[in-house]
Image (cartoon, rainbow, N blue to C red):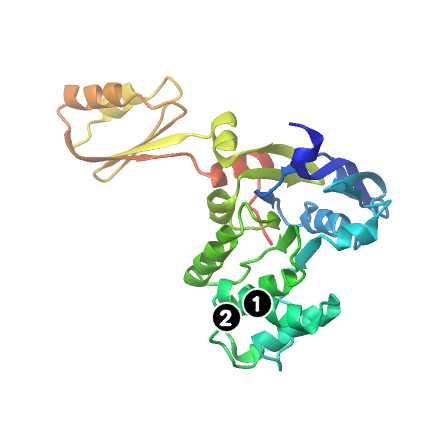
């Protein structure tokens, strides 16, 4: 891919805090218009990376370019093309959603007419147009949507979302996902999240950062296929003899016997062989369920820990 097809490209981006290396020579390339997720455990370097890319802190060494603008040589030009929605919802509680957006329009120096038009467009896009309450009275999900809208007031080409659905219930989280997906192709989005399902659902590409370094990156499918994540076959059945489970084991097949259920994990399930063995042992099959490997399994294998905020 040619250089001008990337919205964000880092080159050995590194940051130390005293004797601790928070980010260690990371290299990622994020294509224009895609959603790219950065995953990692607590303290892995996710937020530090976002802060360097948004010119809030300077790298110790290395650099990055955002649409051809270098974060060291042209930080002001970088800030002109980005929007940032921080992990902590940064809204003014005594103002309405519209007033918060107009306030941001003033911060960005937008003419009043442009600011009003932009606020109305974003309120419609994010489902806020009927909300005239003070922001402090809005639900957490609505406040997160407003925070994202505020980051978009300047119509940035690149959007940084730091834990955009942190603390939301599943229904509110799904609603925010839907609004983020509407931006795909129009904005380049870099998000951090500790919800692996969120990264799997939204992302075109994912990078996993561990102890400051990138240890894996690719599409969600590539990560699941290339890192030996196991596929799962669950068979609902009756009267499972011990010899049946023993015959199924082997050839990288892990077999667990539960009451009326066989659970088999293997990189490449052979359904015909499984059914053949069950029929040989006269096992009555009530149902078969196939589960693809999950991003959780990949993450746990690569980092040895759970992803956290």
Q: Nearer the viewer, mark 1 or mark 2?
A: 2
Whether residue 114 is situated above or below residue 21 in the rendered picture: below
Q: Quadrant of residue 304?
A: top right
Numbered tag placed on residue 146 in the rendering = 1
The answer to which of marks 1 and 2 sits earlier in the sequence is 2
Q: Which residue is mark 2?
A: 128
128 or 86, which is in the foreground?
128
Q: Measuring 42% from the left and 34% from the top, which residue is drawn there? A: 293
In the displayed structure image, the side of residue 156 where residue 17 appears, left or right:
right
Residue closest to the far front:
113
Residue found at x 53% / y 47%: 184
Please tell me how crowded label 1 is: few (under 14), some (14-19), or many (20+) other residues with Cα within 10 Å: many
Residue 57 seen in this snapshot: no
How many labels, in total? 2
Task: Please provide percent x and percent y for residue 62.
Answer: 82, 37
Q: CA distance from mark 1 to mark 2?
A: 8 Å
Percent x, y for residue 143? 55, 69
Q: Residue at x 54, y 65 (%)?
A: 121
- Looking at the image, residue 60 sits to the left or right of residue 34; the answer is right
Secondary structure category for the residue under label 1: helix
In the depicted view, which residue is nearer to us: 208 or 91?
Answer: 91
In the image, which disc is placed on residue 204? none
Vertical order, 87 against 132 (above or below): above
Q: Does 12 sit left or right of 194 as displayed?
A: right
Q: Secondary structure at mark 2?
A: loop
Labels 1 and 2 touching (C-beta < 8 A): yes
Where is residue 279? Give x, y as percent: 15, 22
Q: Nearer the viewer, residue 43 or 79?
A: 79
Query: Quarter holding the N terminus?
Result: top right
Near mark 2 (Cα within 10 A), the count class, few <14, some 14-19 or many ≥20, is: some
């Amino acid at each position: 891919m040619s250089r001008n097809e990337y919205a964000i490209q880092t080159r050995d981006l590194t940051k130390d805090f005293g004797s601790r290396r928070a980010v260690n020579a990371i290299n990622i390339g994020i294509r224009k218009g895609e959603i790219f997720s950065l995953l990692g455990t607590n303290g892995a370097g996710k937020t530090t990376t976002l802060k360097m890319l948004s010119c809030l802190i300077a790298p110790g060494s290395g650099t990055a370019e955002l649409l051809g603008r270098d974060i060291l040589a042209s930080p002001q030009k970088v800030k002109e093309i980005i929007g940032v929605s921080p992990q902590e919802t940064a809204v003014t509680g005594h103002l309405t959603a519209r007033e918060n957006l107009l306030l941001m329009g003033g911060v960005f120096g937008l003419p009043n007419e442009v600011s009003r038009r932009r606020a109305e467009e974003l309120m419609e896009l994010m489902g806020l147009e009927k909300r005239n309450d003070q922001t402090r009275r809005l639900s957490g999900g609505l406040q997160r949507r407003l925070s994202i809208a505020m980051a978009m007031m300047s119509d940035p080409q690149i959007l940084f979302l730091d834990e955009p659905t942190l603390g939301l219930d599943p229904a509110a989280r799904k609603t925010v996902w839907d609004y983020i997906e509407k931006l795909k192709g129009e904005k380049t989005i870099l998000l951090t999240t500790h919800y692996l399902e969120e990264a799997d659902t939204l992302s075109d590409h994912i990078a996993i950062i561990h102890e400051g370094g990138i240890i894996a990156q690719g599409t969600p499918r590539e990560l699941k296929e290339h890192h030996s994540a196991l596929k799962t076959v669950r068979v609902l059945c009756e009267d499972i003899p011990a010899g049946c489970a023993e015959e199924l084991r082997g050839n990288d097949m892990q077999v667990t016997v539960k009451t009326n259920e066989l659970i088999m994990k293997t990189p490449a399930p052979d359904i015909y062989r499984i059914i053949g063995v069950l029929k040989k042992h006269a096992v009555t099959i009530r149902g078969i369920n196939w589960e693809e490997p999950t991003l959780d399994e990949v993450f746990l294998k690569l980092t040895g820990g759970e992803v956290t905020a």
